[in-house]
Image (spheres, helix red, strand yellow):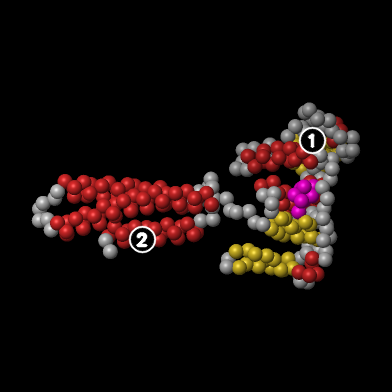
C-alpha cells in the first residue's frame, strides 16, 4: 500500500472517531461535507498516481526520461495532495465542538429533584427552550417551596453588588424579577424603600433625619442610627412562595409531592432516572398538578 493511502486511512479513522464523539448534528453535517470534498481530491490524486505508475511500467521508459504527460500527472498529484493537507485543519475544526453550536439534544423527559425556586426556574425556562420536553418536578414535602424558597424575605436590590465581581449578576437578576412579575402578574411584587436600623440607642427613630425617605410610623423606639439603603427605584420585594409556585405552574410540569429521591440511576455514565423511597409504585400514587393562575 502506498504511503498516500496509509495517510488517508489514518486520517479518516481519526475523523470517524471524532464524529462519533460529537452530539451536535450541525457539526456532523459540516464535517461530512468537508470529508466529501477531501475524498474527491484524494481520489483524483490517487488515480493520477496509479496511472503514472502504470504508464511508466508499461512503456518501460528509462529512468532519466520523463515525458510531458508524466510531468503533468506528477504536478496534478502534488497540487491535489497539497490541497488535501490544506483542508485537513478545516475538517478537524468542523469535528471539534464549539460554544456556538455545541448545545446538547433536549431530553424527551426531564426530572427535576426539588421544588424550590431553582427547580421551578429550571422547569420554566426548559419549557421555553424545549416545548416538547416532558417535565416532572419531584418534591419530598407536601407542597412546593417548603423551606427558604417559600419563607425568605424576598428582598431584591439592583445596586448592592456594584463594584464587585457579581455586579452584572445583581443587575440582571433584579431586572429579570421585575420583568417576570409584570408578565406573570405577581400580586406580591412591589418597589419599596429599604432602611438600615441600628438599635440599642437613646435617640428616637422618628427624630432621625433621612434623605428622601420618611421613617415609617411603625418604627418606634430609640436607636443609634437610621440610614437609607434603597429609595425604591432599585430595591423591591416579592413573596418567594408566589414566585416559585407560579414558575412551576407556567412550566406545565407535573409536580409530584411526597417523593423522596434515594439515588440517581446511571447507564454507561449517562443519567437515566432516579429511585424513590418506597418504590416507584408508591410514589406515583402521590401526584399534584399545580395549575397556572390566570
Instruction: Tell me what residue is drawn at x 70 percent, y 37 percent.
Output: 175
User: Which quadrant, please, contains the C terminus?
Assistant: top right
Residue at the limit of the structure toward the front, as seen here: 58
Instruction: Tell me what residue is drawn at x 63 percent, y 39 percent.
Output: 168
Residue 146: which quarter of the image? bottom right
**Which residues lie in the magenta part?**
246-253
**SS majority, magenta:** helix
* Viewer-nearest of discs 2 and 1: 2
Read off the residue under disc 2. Answer: 10
Q: Is residue 244 left or right of residue 50?
A: right
Any part of residue 70 in sight: yes
Q: Secondary structure at mark 2?
A: helix
Q: Per the image, is 86 magenta?
A: no
Residue 165: which quarter of the image? top right
User: Which quadrant, please, contains the N terminus?
Assistant: bottom left
Read off the residue under disc 1. Answer: 191
Q: Per the image, is 252 magenta?
A: yes
What number is the disc on residue 285?
none
Q: Secondary structure at mark 1?
A: strand
Residue 200: which quarter of the image? top right
Instruction: Tell me what residue is drawn at x 57 percent, y 50 percent.
Output: 103
User: Can you say whether 115 is above or below 279 in the image?
Assistant: above
How far apart are the two marked residues, 2 and 1, measured between alpha carbons? 65 Å
- Residue 193 x %, y %: 79, 35
Amino acid at each position: 500500500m502506498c504511503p498516500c493511502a496509509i495517510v488517508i486511512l489514518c486520517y479518516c479513522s481519526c475523523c470517524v472517531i471524532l464524529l462519533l464523539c460529537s452530539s451536535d448534528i450541525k457539526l456532523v453535517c459540516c464535517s461530512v461535507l468537508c470529508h466529501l470534498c477531501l475524498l474527491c481530491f484524494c481520489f483524483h490524486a490517487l488515480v493520477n498516481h496509479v496511472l503514472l505508475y502504470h504508464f511508466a511500467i508499461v512503456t518501460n521508459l528509462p529512468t532519466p526520461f520523463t515525458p510531458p504527460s508524466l510531468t503533468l500527472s506528477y504536478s496534478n498529484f502534488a497540487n491535489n495532495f497539497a490541497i488535501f493537507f490544506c483542508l485537513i485543519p478545516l475538517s478537524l475544526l468542523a469535528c471539534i465542538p464549539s460554544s456556538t453550536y455545541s448545545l446538547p439534544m433536549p431530553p424527551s423527559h426531564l426530572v427535576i429533584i426539588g421544588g424550590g425556586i431553582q427547580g421551578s426556574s429550571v422547569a420554566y425556562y426548559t419549557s421555553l427552550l424545549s416545548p416538547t420536553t416532558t417535565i416532572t418536578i419531584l418534591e419530598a414535602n407536601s407542597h412546593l417551596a417548603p423551606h427558604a424558597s417559600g419563607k425568605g424575605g424576598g428582598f431584591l436590590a439592583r445596586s448592592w453588588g456594584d463594584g464587585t465581581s457579581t455586579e452584572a449578576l445583581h443587575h440582571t437578576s433584579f431586572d429579570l424579577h421585575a420583568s417576570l412579575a409584570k408578565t406573570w402578574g405577581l400580586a406580591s411584587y412591589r418597589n419599596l424603600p429599604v432602611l438600615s436600623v441600628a438599635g440599642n440607642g437613646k435617640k428616637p427613630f422618628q427624630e432621625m433625619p433621612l434623605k428622601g425617605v420618611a421613617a415609617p410610623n411603625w418604627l418606634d423606639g430609640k436607636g443609634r442610627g437610621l440610614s437609607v439603603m434603597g429609595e425604591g427605584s432599585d430595591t423591591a420585594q416579592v413573596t418567594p412562595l408566589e414566585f416559585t409556585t407560579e414558575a412551576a405552574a407556567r412550566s406545565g410540569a407535573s409536580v409530584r409531592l411526597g417523593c423522596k429521591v434515594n439515588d440517581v440511576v446511571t447507564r454507561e455514565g449517562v443519567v437515566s432516572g432516579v429511585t424513590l423511597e418506597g418504590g416507584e409504585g408508591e410514589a406515583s400514587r402521590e401526584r399534584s398538578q399545580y395549575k397556572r393562575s390566570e
